[in-house]
Image: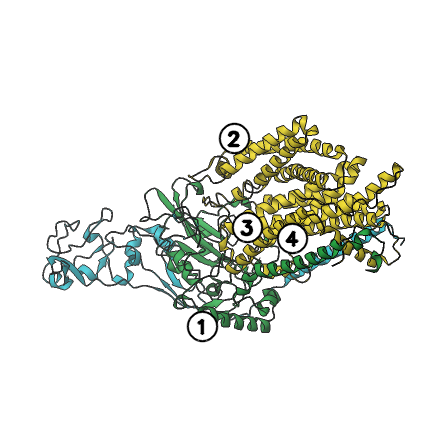
Chain colours: A cyan, B green, C yellow
Amino acid sequence: MKISAGKMLFFVGLIIISAIAAQMYASVKQRERIVSPPQAEYSTLFPVKINAPKPLAEIATDQKDAKGNAILVSCQSCHSVRSPNPQNGSAGPLISFHQDLDFVHGKLVCISCHNPEGYYADFRLASGESINPENVMTLCAQCHGPQFRDYQNGSHGGMTGHWDLRKGPRQRNHCVDCHDPHKPAFPLFRPVAGPNDRFTPHQTKGTHE
Amino acid sequence: MSDSNASLPIIDNPGVNRRRFLKTAGATLGLAAWAAAMKPLLDLTPEVNADEFLQKHYRELTPEQKAVVFKRLEEEAKAEYDVDVTISDPPPMENVLFGYALNLSVCIGCRKCAEACHIENNHDRASNNSYICVFEMEKGGIDFEKGNATYDHPVPAPGKYYMPVQCQQCENAPCVTACPIEATWKEKDGIVVVDYNWCIGCRYCEAACPYHARRFNWEKPEIPAEEVNPDQSYLSNRIRPQGVMEKCTFCLHRTREGRLPACLEACPTGARVFGNLLDPDSEIRWVIENKRTFVLKEELGTKPRFFYYFDE
Amino acid sequence: MVEAQIPSPPAPQKNSAVLSYLGFLRRATGVATDGEWYFYVWMIVLSGIALVGANAWAQQVRDGMIVTNMSDHVSWGLYIANFTFCVGLAAGGVMMVIPAYLYDDEEMHQVVIIGEAVAIAAILMSTLSVVVDLGRPDRFWHLIPGIGKFNWPLSMLTWDIIVLNGYLLINLHIVGYLLYMRYLGRKPNPKWYIPFVFLSIFWAISIHTITAFLYCGLGGRPFWNTALLAPRFLASAFVSGPAFIILSMRVMRLLTDFHFSPKPANTLIRIIRVSMCVNLLMLFSEVFTLFYTGGSHASSAQYLFFGSHGANGLVPWMWASIVLNIVGAILFFTPAALRRENTRIVACLFCIVGIWIEKGMGLIIPGFIPSTLHEVVEYSPSLIEWKVTAGIWAFGLLILTLILKLIASVFSYDLSRKISMKQNVVPEETPATTSMPVETT
């Protein structure tokens, strides 16, 4: 055989380089191949529904039943016969009703939001204008402007359903779904159990299986 | 042998035959021992079968072949988990690039998102696995060294804030570059997916990921039949085989059909915002344009599509 | 199985090259598997350990990687640590080629082949270490370019696969060719191996560099993400490889008829002296940069050297490694290392173990502790992992024994002929017929 080592190496090199080039070409080709989904037409968008606030119908009195639970009474029973005292700023002086009311909401007083005439079913804006429970978010927005702005732009308040309204509707929380209007600060949560990785530090069991 | 006739004294040595015999016996014994040592392989679950072995890469499957594969996977789920599942394969949507944002001011660290992920994505029950890791961080910085992912006390604790971390669906995903066999890649809508039937389980991607976003199936996932989420897709939440990587896909089986991801729906405080980055009217775009968002480990150049922000 | 034969004296081969090469292989197998009782004991012990490892691996494939102590936080463990060391060993094995050819050190030529043999065994071990680390070894074919999907040139792992396999082929070629020529009694044609020897020098550097790139290319792991990693790998390989070769030569000298002049070992010790200093210097620079700067980049080093958050599983390992390396280096620097065998052997063992820890447990594991999000989850290998790793070492040593034995047989015959001819003495009739060249521990 008269093939010199140099030639041999040259050919081996040539083969390797062409294999490399082919591989690169193939990988580039591969990247170009992309799936294109069928184009769909959407004429209408699905609605975004906001949870309606639950109307309040009963209130705890100072009376307890045999089991020690507070006896509830319909709002009507008192509010139809006696008019509220606009001077009341908290539930403290109310010794025989509104017993479960824990009020921690800035310096507000009852009539800051409640309409004295409409008691539980009617609210009033700072302007004195009356507002019904469905639109109560406007009431909150009087003070919580940034939150309301964020809510309107989808970055405050939980939601479920569709991000793409062309495909389906969306359900959004109302302020009062998460915040108790009388004590709006978020309550403490017991977190869901954390990761249970075999070797996480909090784990006492050090072995597997 | 013919060419061994260069006569050597050893030929007539009676020891040679004995030695030859011993060698043959030794070799036979060796083979038997080898077979015995490898016996555990015979107990392998039926999931390792010829069809599975020969299956092509996801992106090389024709629609017909995909149908066959999905049917086989459904049958396997029936056989192994005793549950009727449907395996879909929603393609990326046109003109959609998914983005996610998370409001650290309102996240309270309740881990509801992690729980929802656990259920939605058919994770192994015993390990309580989830693609989301929630860190309890000390106010005053974003220092994971002071973070704690295994807290177990009522939240939010004073002086702390909470930072859920999941796959950031990086534009420059280090995991995709690392994979030696293209078993993981970035889809057109920006989601990094894994072909669980192509991955060889070398875990190089897990080493490469700066966000601890990838998980390995150290064993076959165990899920009671009644807890299996039967609404599955090939690239996302189908029950993964043993020995392969898995990761968050922004619930692509949901989001590619226009639905919100499971972690977002589960969030009780609305800290999570999801949407199409290409749509100028989307919520996610509003957040990026109006909030001071940041990404994790920006200095690494991974260009995440997961944004964090604080309210003022 | 063919009767155990000494490779025949250079019988003129008239057959085609292929047939005669097959004949050579057949005889080589015969020679390599023939020996004294202690050879068989050694081989049986190694096979036993390899079988235990194979069995442990089969269990791991069946039950999943859960039988290891790796986790999503520490996703690589003993296997990859051992892989890194073995790659270094393979690279270092060829280092003795450099003085032999680049500086025309004639004395080194005869032991170059030992280095190549060590390289072959080490490459096999590193390949096996990666295979046992795979979660799905049944899908191995996905890695084969052309049939599978080879993410080349993006993934550093594909580069590593290419260089490791290429290196194995080059070394198989060189060893096979040199042995074959000896067997035929011909003078090896430099054209057919010198280019490959030079190629293997560069290739040896590339395998360890690229293995370092596997780690230091990962931006998310600050402990690895340092430009000094590849040079450090090379420096330590220049220690562990030659040290391993010195040990092999010692064993061969004790148990076979293949004799070396003392010069090559001394050249190797000089290489080790320099490399060990460079290695320790770079280690020190690394440690200085980390601790003097501090911050979260130092947290892995903090964990490695002093423990952090109450976790200190690697501290004893790392300090043991540093002590072994320093003591080994000091021993190598004593004049006794060039004269007294035992000092040299102890120094070699110290450095090999020290570097095994430094490149393995001390480099791979702390890359994961703390994790990228600073969770501290510790790792110590499970029994299965130890078994599999021991099995891989047993297999590697088994292959090395066979190759070295073959080399000893082929070369000692040849050498004895040469010497006898030089001295004009009729050689004793086939010197090694009854006492086969055997080597063992």
Q: Residue furthest front?
A: B14
Depth check, front residue: C141 or B214: C141
Q: Secondary structure at mark 4?
A: helix
**Which comes sooner in the sequence, label 2 or label 4?**
4
Q: Residue furthest top?
A: C335
Above/below status of A72 relative to C205:
below
* A200 lies left or right of B12: left
Kindly identify the residue that appears in the image at 15 percent across and 52 percent down. Answer: A86
* Marking on residue C158: 4
Depth check, front residue: A60 or A45: A60
* Marking on residue B84: 1
Residue located beneath label 3 in the image:
C387
Q: Residues within 10 Å of mark 3 (few under 14, many from 20)?
A: many
Q: Secondary structure at mark 1?
A: loop
Q: CA distance from mark 2 to mark 3?
A: 40 Å
Q: CA distance from mark 2 to mark 4?
A: 36 Å
Residue B231: x and y, percent? Answer: 45, 68
Residue located beneath label 2 in the image:
C292
Both labels 1 and 3 in a single chain:
no
Above/below status of B91 relative to C411:
below
Residue C357: x and y, percent? Answer: 57, 40
Of all chains, the one bearing label 2 is: C
What residue type is disc 4 on? Thr
What residue type is disc 1 on? Asp
* B54 lies left or right of C296: right
Viewer-nearest of labels 1 and 3? 3
Q: CA distance from mark 4 to mark 1?
A: 39 Å
Viewer-nearest of labels 2 and 3? 3
**Which comes sooner in the sequence, label 2 or label 3?**
2
Q: Residues within 10 Å of mark 4 (few under 14, many from 20)?
A: many
Q: Residues within 10 Å of mark 1 (few under 14, many from 20)?
A: some
